[in-house]
Image (cartoon, rainbow, N blue to C red):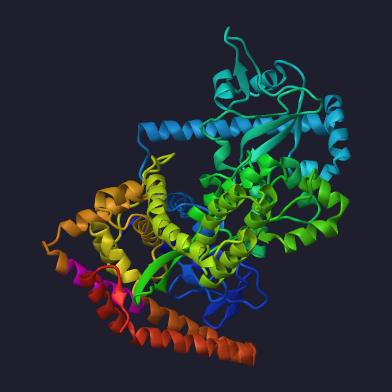
Amino acid sequence: MSVVDEIKRRLDIVEFIGSYVPLQKAGRNFKALCPFHTEKTPSFIVFAETQSWHCFGACSTGGDIFGFAMRQENMTFSEALRFLAERAGVSLRPLDGEEAKRKDEIDRLRAVNSAAAQHYHRVLMAAPAGESAVRYLEGRGVSRETMATFQLGYAVDDWHDLEQHLRRAGISQPDMLAAGLLSESDSGNVYDRFRGRLVFPIRDVRGQVIGFAGRVLDDSVPKYLNSPQTSLFDKGSVLYGIDLARRSIRETGRVIIVEGYMGVIVLQQCGVPNVVACMGTALTERQLRILKPMTEVLILALDADTAGRLATERGVRMAQELLKQRVVPVLTARGLVRYEEHLDAEIRILVLPEGLDPDELVLRDRARWDALVTHALSVADYFFETIFQEVDTSTAKGKRVAVERLLPVIAALGSPVERAHYLQRLAQTVRVDERDLARQLDRLRLGSAGSDRGRARARAQRSPEQPVPDQAAQPAFGLEERCLALLLQTPTMLLQVTKTGMLGEEAFQDARNREVFASLRRFVLASPECDDIKVGAGLDTDQTAHVEWLLDTLCGGPPFSPEMAREDLVKCSMRLRKKYLSHLIGELRFVHQDAQEHGTEERVRELNEIIDDLTRDYLQIDQRAYAATLAGRSGRDTRIR
């Protein structure tokens, strides 16, 4: 039995999920309001018999105990493995020398940061030295209760105050240096990094202090000082306030992103809990990866000055590249079907009044803040308004600049109706023939596909930041594993089974397999001609051992030709899809029965329609398998008959 299976055997999914959300008995199973989106009627079902869960509402997703832990705690599979193993009392493979050394260092630095945060907070709240900082915070509208919630602190204007305190607590100077709490001069003198500053502890998604930011209370420079990069802290990989905001982000289905610490603190105090701050002037890819599992609606509320506008534009483009994509069929002029990747997320821009920060605005005029959030601009509207303010479209140069900057914005829109709307708007504003702009747009969209793939390939081939060993013994080589292994060996076949609806992420019930499939799909969409070596480079390190095992197991069997591999994959995909749909229909019949007893007629009709749709999908699988086989033989385009 694998470690994963042993953990599942020891942990009851009903008890585990029940520790996060209140479950209500419903026949042999349990139901609850979904913890991942806001709803009034329970659509989240935990199936005791199969030890699985599924949301039949807006999320439309499910999985096993690992999938729930990964989604709820924002964990990778490897992190969930350690988390659940500890909870189940299952021993994992002992760490080797380097791994054990790194874990010990991380544990020590966490303890150092925790002790420093407690000291800074105690000085702020109880020592005379912190009184000026308290007055400053109260003047900015921050209550003492909020100071405690965010564990705000004050660093005494002394060269060795923190060092002496931590030494008395038994913490060594090398660990203080490693945590970034001390600095060292060229002459070798060591001193406190933060002195005479209001201190903001920076916590990760699980609330552990990983670094600090300090702000002066006068006009000296630098105004802000962050911890240096350490084994724990990288300002491009953290969002301030995420530990307090993550539940609200899931419940509201959206996140508001601001620039400053005070914006987060005051907004959360004023009842806007789904707000975080980026640790600099622009969103980074790693910060977006934190938010990606929580929401698909991002509202950027960055400063209205030039730097803020540039940061907004960079953040938008980063989000468009990284956030969830879906493949949709597009009919070409020649009667062919081309499959394109469209953004399955919503990005909106909250334009702040000139000279006002979010905290100042919400304290001065809460109704205006709420209105700005409600009427936040779409990406296209934001760029149109901004660019038309910046350029003079009455001149030839202004027309050219506007077209050059706005056509890429239009090209990124997924809806043909939206593209037509904004193309018409651009043509009318710059007074250029719409047909000429349409031809430029077509050329741009055809060319951008290659550059998008290049950017995604570059991201996928970056070295992972922190290698995480896969410590689990491998499971049995079942249907999911065979599908994955075939896809990993010949990745170009993935498009043939996904674009016909044969195979999707949801069909993989094992959380580790689902994670590998999702990574593989992202990489293949970015690099349709990739081979298995490049795919391996694109996968996260914590998936690598599982991938190697899948390929080794497949290669250990009898050899087969590419044609045999394609047919085998289609058959495996067909069986896996049927298995998933059969399981889902069975679960829905239970939900349907519960709705008949306790729900409304509207809910019963809705479930009937869903079951009918899934049943039709099940009956059409053989046709899709045939289409996938044809697609594999004829290339990427399939002619409409």
For residue 226, side relative to residue 573 (left or right): right
- Does the magenta stretch mainly form a helix, a strand or a loop? helix
**Quadrant position of residue 176:** top right
Percent coordinates x, y for residue 627 in the rendering? 27, 78
Camera-side residue of 274 and 443? 443
Percent coordinates x, y for residue 355 in the rendering? 80, 43
Camera-side residue of 610 and 421? 421
**Residue at point 63% right, 55% down?**
383
**Residue at point 38% right, 68% down?**
339
Camera-side residue of 615 and 426? 426
For residue 92, side relative to residue 397 (left or right): left
Q: Is residue 480 magenta?
A: no
**Quadrant position of residue 592:** bottom right
Question: Is 12 situated above or below 516?
Answer: below
Q: Quadrant of the N terminus?
A: bottom left
**Magenta segment:** 564-579
